[in-house]
Image: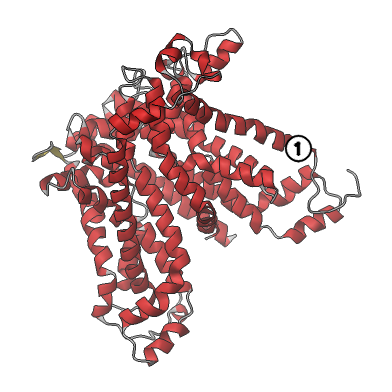
């Protein structure tokens, strides 16, 4: 191997170039399906049926997107998804912050045992409790309601685990000083510690929102009426009339339209999402 | 744990302090712990939607393991995990190695590879259905350029699961890449500087420095992906409905069809307990491996 190179760290070998070439080829495979779908969404259906290759050349039309505004239930589903995701995210942040503070900072009978039980909850997959949970919600008449879709998300143990870890990492001197000032436990939590946990709140909030927005199984079995569908379930339901009267172009326009909100969220919060993911990895 | 590690309690124990954890515990007990035990109870009963029928002992489990479709679904799940998890780990590592720089191109490609992960399973399957669909799909079009006819991937018994695996890899590749990138950035730069002074080539550096340093992350990625891919449902349900011939039906889809389509709730509960046991074994493996790593 050559002995001299300008920077010992930045030196790139043949292997790096081979890998980079492979990565560039792969990225075509990443993008092509999406471009294909966008292309189809901009084509008139009869033209598409006559010649599939017509997607590669104009005329492109936005008629399929205009048709969504008039006929599609997509708006209602987006609204439902928003209500559900915001509900789950807000509820999780409140519950996990309170519990995280309690487990990390306070003493009460049974604290250790309870925390271990909650940790065990992390190992329970959703599918292990779905059948019984569905039965319970049937008895309570919770199906096809917003709270019926929101409530199961609030039992997730991950948030409590994350917040407990975070509260533990804050120096104890802070609350001890506040305690000397005769502040109440809740005031210490609310005024002193909670503002310090904002980065963790952002991480947990992003994860919870994405997870809830994209959740498919629970809304599928709980929201069975069309007007209560979340966007994920709704888009699944239109797939069954694939290539029927409505046409591929219209279907693809709906797909693009339905993917857009979360994609915009991704573009906006990209930095936070990446930090959240890598932060969770280092831990 | 040694008694020396036990800290003296700086703050007095008070039951009122438990009020902070009580709200979460309520949801945890009502929506996770209680259904978990009720699910086990249901699996020993002949239950349907509106009634919890008579106690039937192990009858549901016996029925389950005599059901060829269920056994097929266990095999399908393992096959799917085998197809996806190693690929995700290796391709994810490759991407991380290639894109671990602050150049503009690397930044753009990183967010490109992660962007598919934020889509929901329904959008992803909608996209891939239009790739695989015969005659005017993307695959058919590309084959057409070479005058060939593309296979009908999703209805071919040999290809259907591979099609689902490809869809899944496209969807999930972002997370392993990000985890590996985070690990690569933890490796101290001076090790590489020392290696460069020793005239170590690209390959040697990779084999003797980079890979050993991220061994823990590699195990972590494998375990996360095993647990995740074990729960395959949406891709199969939306792309193939489990067909052809139940060859792409995973355990979770079996549970869904049994409990929520045929309303054989007892049998569905039994199947979900089997899945739970399988995932617990995987989680236990994670615990044991991480323990061994810490000891060494």
Name the image quarter holding residue B32: bottom left
Q: Which residue is drawn at 31% across and 64% down?
A: A95
User: In x, y percent, where is residue B190?
Assistant: 76, 61
Name the image quarter holding residue A131: top left
Q: Tell me the residue that label 1 is attached to.
A: A17
The count of marks equals 1
- In the image as oriented, which residue stretches furthest toward the top? B147
Colouring scheme applied when the structure was drawn: secondary structure
User: In x, y percent, where is residue A103?
Assistant: 35, 71
Up-down: is B67 above or below B115?
above
Q: Residue at x 67, y 51 (%)?
A: B212
Dot 1, crowdedness within 10 Å: few (<14), some or many (≥20)? few
User: In x, y percent, where is residue B199?
Assistant: 86, 50
Q: Quadrant of the N terminus of chain B?
A: bottom left
* A181 relative to A264 in the view: left or right: left
Res B215 visible? yes
* A105 relative to B205 in the view: left or right: left
Up-down: is B2 above or below A67?
below
Q: Which residue is drawn at 57% across and 16% down?
A: B142
Instruction: Tell which of A22 and A283 is nearer to you.
Output: A22
Q: Is mark 1 on a helix, strand or loop?
A: helix
Instruction: Tell which of B215 and A50 is nearer to you.
Output: A50
Q: Mark 1 lies on which chain?
A: A
User: In x, y percent, where is residue B262?
Assistant: 18, 29
Q: Residue at x 32, y 54 (%)?
A: A86
* A273 relative to B296 in the view: left or right: left
Instruction: Tell which of B24 and B119 is nearer to you.
Output: B119
């Amino acid at each position: 191997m050559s002995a001299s190179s300008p920077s010992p760290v930045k030196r790139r070998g043949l292997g790096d170039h081979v890998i980079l070439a492979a990565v560039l080829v792969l990225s075509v495979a990443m993008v092509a399906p999406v471009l294909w779908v966008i292309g189809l969404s901009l084509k008139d259906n009869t033209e598409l049926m006559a010649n599939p290759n017509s997607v590669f050349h104009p005329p492109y039309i936005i008629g399929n997107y205009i048709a969504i505004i008039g006929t599609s239930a997509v708006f209602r589903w987006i609204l439902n998804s928003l209500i559900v995701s915001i509900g789950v995210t807000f509820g999780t942040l409140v519950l996990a912050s309170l519990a995280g503070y309690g487990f990390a900072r306070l003493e009460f009978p049974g604290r250790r045992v309870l925390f271990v039980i909650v940790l065990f909850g992390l190992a329970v997959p959703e599918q292990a409790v779905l059948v019984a949970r569905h039965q319970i919600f049937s008895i309570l008449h919770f199906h096809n309601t917003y709270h019926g879709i929101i409530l199961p998300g609030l039992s997730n143990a991950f948030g409590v685990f994350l917040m407990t870890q975070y509260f533990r990492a804050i120096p104890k001197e802070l609350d001890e000083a506040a305690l000397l000032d005769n502040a109440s436990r809740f005031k210490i939590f609310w005024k002193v510690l909670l503002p310090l946990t904002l980065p963790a709140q952002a991480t947990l909030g992003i994860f919870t929102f994405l997870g809830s927005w994209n959740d498919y199984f629970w809304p599928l079995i709980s929201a069975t009426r069309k007007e209560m569908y979340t966007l994920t379930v709704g888009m699944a339901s239109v797939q069954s009339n694939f290539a029927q009267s409505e046409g591929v172009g219209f279907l693809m326009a709906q797909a693009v339209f339905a993917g857009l909100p979360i994609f915009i969220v991704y573009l906006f919060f990209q930095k936070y999402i990446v930090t959240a993911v890598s932060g969770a990895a280092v831990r | 744990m040694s008694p020396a590690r036990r800290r003296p309690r700086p703050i007095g124990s008070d039951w009122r302090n438990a009020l902070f954890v009580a709200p979460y515990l309520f949801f945890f007990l009502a929506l996770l712990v209680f259904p978990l035990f009720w699910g086990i109870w249901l699996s020993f009963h002949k239950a349907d939607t509106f009634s919890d029928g008579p106690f039937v002992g192990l009858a549901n489990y016996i029925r389950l393991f005599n059901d060829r479709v269920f056994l097929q679904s266990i095999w399908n799940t393992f096959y799917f995990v085998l197809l996806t998890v190693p690929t995700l780990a290796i391709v994810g590592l490759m991407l991380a190695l290639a894109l671990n720089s602050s150049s503009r191109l690397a930044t753009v490609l990183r967010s490109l590879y992660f962007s598919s992960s934020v889509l929901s399973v329904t959008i992803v399957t909608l996209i891939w259905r239009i790739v695989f669909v015969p005659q005017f799909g993307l695959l058919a079009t590309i084959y057409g350029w070479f005058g060939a006819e593309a296979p009908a991937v999703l209805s071919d018994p040999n290809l259907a699961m591979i099609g689902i695996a490809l869809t899944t890899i496209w969807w999930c590749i972002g997370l392993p890449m990000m985890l590996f990138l985070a690990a690569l950035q933890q490796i101290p730069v001076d090790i590489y500087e020392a290696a460069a002074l020793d005239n170590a080539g690209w390959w040697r550096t990779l084999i003797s420095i980079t890979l050993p340093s991220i061994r823990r992350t590699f195990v972590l990625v494998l375990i996360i992906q095993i647990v995740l891919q074990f729960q395959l449902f949406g891709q199969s349900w939306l792309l193939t409905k489990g067909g052809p011939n139940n060859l792409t039906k995973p355990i979770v889809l079996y549970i869904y069809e049994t409990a929520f389509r045929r309303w054989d709730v007892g049998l569905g509960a039994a199947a979900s307990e089997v899945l739970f046991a399988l995932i617990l074994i995987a989680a236990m493996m994670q615990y044991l491996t991480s323990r061994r790593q810490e000891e060494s």
